[in-house]
Amino acid sequence: MPNSEMSVEMISTPDRLKDMVAEMLSSDVISLDTESNSRHRYPEQLCLVQIATATGIYIIDTIRINDISTLGSILANPAQVKVIHDASYDVRCLDRHQGLHFSGIFDTSIAARFLGFSQISLAAIIESTVGKKIAKSTRLQQSDWGKRPLTTEALEYASGDVRYLIQIREILERKLKTLGRLDWVMEEFGRLEEVRYVPPDKENEYQYLKGTRDLDGRALSILKSLYWFREETALRERRPPYFILPDEYLINLASHPGQDLSNVFGLSEFRKRTMGRGLLEAIRKGEKGAPIEINRQNNFERPTMQQIARLGSLKSWRVSLGAKLNIDPALIWPRESLEAIAKDPGEFEANLNSEIVRRWQREEFGSTLANYVRSIY
């Protein structure tokens, strides 16, 4: 069945979801994508999971089906390939919201990078592999996927994200085999499967807002109070914190706590009216609190001129090899490893076996790099 004629079904009941999973168990490969509404709701919701087989597209309404754990039998099956474009977010998203984990991922964006594609957006890869042009509407991409009912246009957009992925995987995999790089990407896919969602450190997140380094202990106490006031407001209104009050406004208020709110540039009249009292109370609470001292340990050791020169040589080696293989030089060898080698070439062997260096990198380029290091040091 041509991709453009694939049936599209909305899955909105637990019973139909179970039947769909049973039907898919015999499929060797599926494609997958997710849609969330982090731009519109706080905390964000997982709104859709789109899955395609060779013959049809299924759009799972995760607003109406709270528990989609039945998908686990498919997602965790290593014998069933899951084709995803730029899978890092989807892996974290499904872990965060449903505790679902993957095995058998094929990430088309990673595969494209290892094939030297100059553009790796989904639309660009679809056009360069299967010759189809798809419209990627920013309006739809940034729309509130939690709203119901979904429009026909929105459903078409969502189905387009998985419609061609199985076909693309076949094309990319053939190219990777021809170049002898399939094992390279398979190791990358394996690492991707180990990715998990890590919740933000809410207790200390305020300390990392841009501009906090210029604040003294008293201002930091005020900033912490303002941060939690914004967090509570965001949860109450179910709106993302930056929609409630951008970070720079918090820094401004913490830096100049005595200013009249009417003089705060950019603070809307609506927010002054609805949040003015709360902001002033948060500022007073912060002023009464003990000054906060942040232990900003700076373990950065400025490299010597010799180490800088070494790193430059190593990066040139990587760039030259990347050009020869027609892939992004960053894929050849991790920058962190090159920095460690430049700092102390005598620890090359230990660095070679570091966990940040992939097995395929050691096997393909380890000897070449070792010879290069010996030749220049």
Image: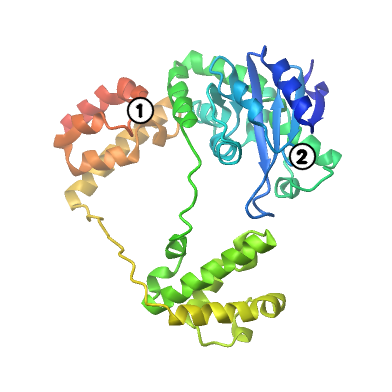
- Residue type, numbered disc 2: Arg
Residue 353 is situated, as x and y percent measured from the top left of the image, at: 25, 28
Q: Position of residue 236 (x, y in %)?
A: 66, 63
Neighbour tally class for label 2: few under 14, some 14-19, many 20 plus, Cα within 10 Å: some
Which residue is rendered at x = 37% and y = 31% of the image?
332
Q: Quadrant of the C terminus?
A: top left
Asked if one can make out residue 377 in the rendered structure from this viewpoint, the answer is no
- Please name the residue shown 18% across and 52% down the image: 304
Asked if residue 318 is positioned above or below residue 176 in the image, the reply reads below
The residue shown at (65%, 76%) is 275
The N terminus: image quadrant: top right
Looking at the picture, does residue 141 appear above or below residue 18?
Answer: below
In this image, 146 relative to 28: left or right?
Answer: right
Q: Which residue is mark 2?
A: 64
The answer to whether mark 1 and mark 2 are in CB contact below 8 A is: no
Image spot of residue 172 (x, y percent):
57, 21
Q: Residue at x 79, y 41 (%)?
A: 154
Q: Which mark is residue 224?
A: none
User: What secondary structure is found at the residue carrying circle 1?
Assistant: loop
In this rendering, position of residue 26 left or right of residue 283: right
**As drawn, 57 above or below 170:** below
Asked whether residue 198 appears in the rendered view, the answer is yes
Q: Residue 233 at what x, y percent from top left?
A: 63, 66
The earlier-in-sequence mark between 1 and 2 is 2
- Residue under numbered circle 1: 358
